[in-house]
Amino acid sequence: MTVTRFAPSPTGYIHVGNLRTALMNYLIARKSGGTFILRLDDTDRERSKQEYADGIMADLDWLGLQWDRVEKQSERLDRYAEVADELRQSGDLYEVFETPTELDLKRKKLLNMGRPPVYDRAGLGLSEAEKDRLRAEREGYWRFKLDQQRTEWEDGIFGHVSIDSASVSDPVLIRADGQVLYTFASSVDDIDMGITHIVRGSDHVTNTATQIQIMHAIGGTPPAFAHHSLLTGPQGEGLSKRLGTLSLRDLRAKGVAREALLSLMARLGSSQPVELKMSLDEIAEGFELAQFGAAPTKFDAEDLWPLTRARNQALPFEAVQERILGLGVPAEMAERFWRVASQNITTLEDLGHWWALCRDGAEPVIAAEDAEFVRQAVALLPEPPYSDATWGEWTAAVKEATGRKGKGLFLPLRLALTGQASGPEMAELMPLLQKVRAKG
RNA sequence: GGCCCGUUCGUCUAUCGGUUAGGACGUCAGGUUUUCAACCUGAAAAGAGGGGUUCGACUCCCCUACGGGCUGCCA
């Protein structure tokens, strides 16, 4: 039984980076008929907010990434305390007392000597008497004693990974104020909840080494790990600074379609071509972790637009009927309007532009050399309303009168009527036009 | 500074020592549509640099350069 989880901390909204992680875990579970758990890693009490938790769930809902169960770390504090006691007894957890300032000093000193800034384990050498004296001054906190060997695993994406744990500081698992830290809570949860596969960003590879050790210490068997590469911007720059503008809700507000987002994020960085899929089932079908590369992946939000366009153009009239009527399009014209406009939109918001053009006419665009031609042509155009035949009849008449044909005939007329060089099939558009501003 | 990982067409990537280095997106050019778009066909386009190993290296090893990550009493 496959069990995966998406474990965001509710300290912000979902962005493209998170989404990739969530999606991969979701797809792995779905592909094998397993369980997908949404786990809110909310042990950081100062930064975690209900508002963000709600936002994350709303975003996952929108995407259709349905979770089978929600877990909250804040509701499992007793369990963490219990496991922590076991680790204290086994000697895996030891008490330390350095202040942040002291630690900072130690780090700088080591760095100056050209040595790696690894915690010196001073706490391990403290006698009971010394600890008592320190406890009288301040609250102690707890570090996990890493075995300073290499920690290795077969990564689902990176292949064989080997981390030298001697180059990693013993992680703090429990703070002076008693707060349980992510590294610990997460390890306990993954074991308790029977997680079988963890996919997360490659920013966690070092964590994985220490968490594997923690999992062993609490008597668990580590799940299979896979670390996906991190996204960078189109220039290869780190995405973290720009993540604010790449939140799901912002993209959604800009009109990005969920199918576009899912289709791109499930394939970007893999050897599979990115093509529009209309359902998560279709997306899951070709999804293989092993097809993802380990190199940083460039993400360009612009790539979402062609997919969004393809998705919107594929929508049946019924799906947009309400929206179109909402624009004020008369019911008898609605279906034709969709047929005509749908091929020329990116987001559904663009429909408003086309309807405004039909209703109010467009500011004509007339090149200087076409001015006389357009004047002649417009004089031959009757008043609205128009029929299916209007365009053919009119252009034939204009051709007759001016001798123009082909591009020289049609493009100036299109520009005069719609103000744009590209757009819907003119013959189809004409019956929708209520006004032609070029007629003055 | 230390520890991980990475580097193939513009982009995402395939290639598990011998290939005309393949595909997809994008770009460009033709075709088609009495215009644009859509569509069809075609083209241009790549192994970071330097050393090894080998009959033979994109592929294995080392060095350099560059990119990303980690190096918190954050996650």
Image: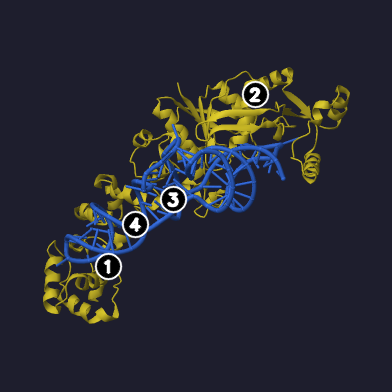
Q: Secondary structure at mark 2?
A: helix
Q: Which mark is residue A246?
A: none
Q: Secondary structure at mark 4?
A: helix
Q: CA distance from mark 1 to mark 2?
A: 66 Å
- Name the chain letter of the residue that bears numbered label 1: A
Chain shaded yellow = A
Q: Is residue A10 visible?
A: no
State the residue in front, A304 or B54: B54
Quadrant in which residue B15 is drawn: top left
Q: Which mark is residue A350?
A: 4
Q: CA distance from mark 3 to mark 1?
A: 27 Å
Q: Secondary structure at mark 1?
A: helix
Q: Secondary structure at mark 3?
A: helix
- Name the chain letter of the residue that bears numbered label 4: A
Chain B painted colour: blue
- Of the residues under marks 3 and 1, which one precedes in the sequence? 3
Q: CA distance from mark 4 to mark 1?
A: 15 Å
Q: Is residue A59 left or right of residue A347?
A: right
Q: Which mark is residue A253?
A: 3
Image location (x, y in percent) of residue A69: 48, 27
Q: What amino acid does circle 4 point to?
A: Asp
Image location (x, y in percent) of residue A179: 69, 31
Task: Kindly indicate whether the residue at mark 3 contacts the one at mark 4 (C-beta within 8 angstroms).
Answer: no
Label 2, on which residue?
A: A80
Quadrant in which residue A42 is drawn: top right
Q: Is residue A375 left or right of residue B3?
A: left
Q: What amino acid does circle 2 point to?
A: Tyr
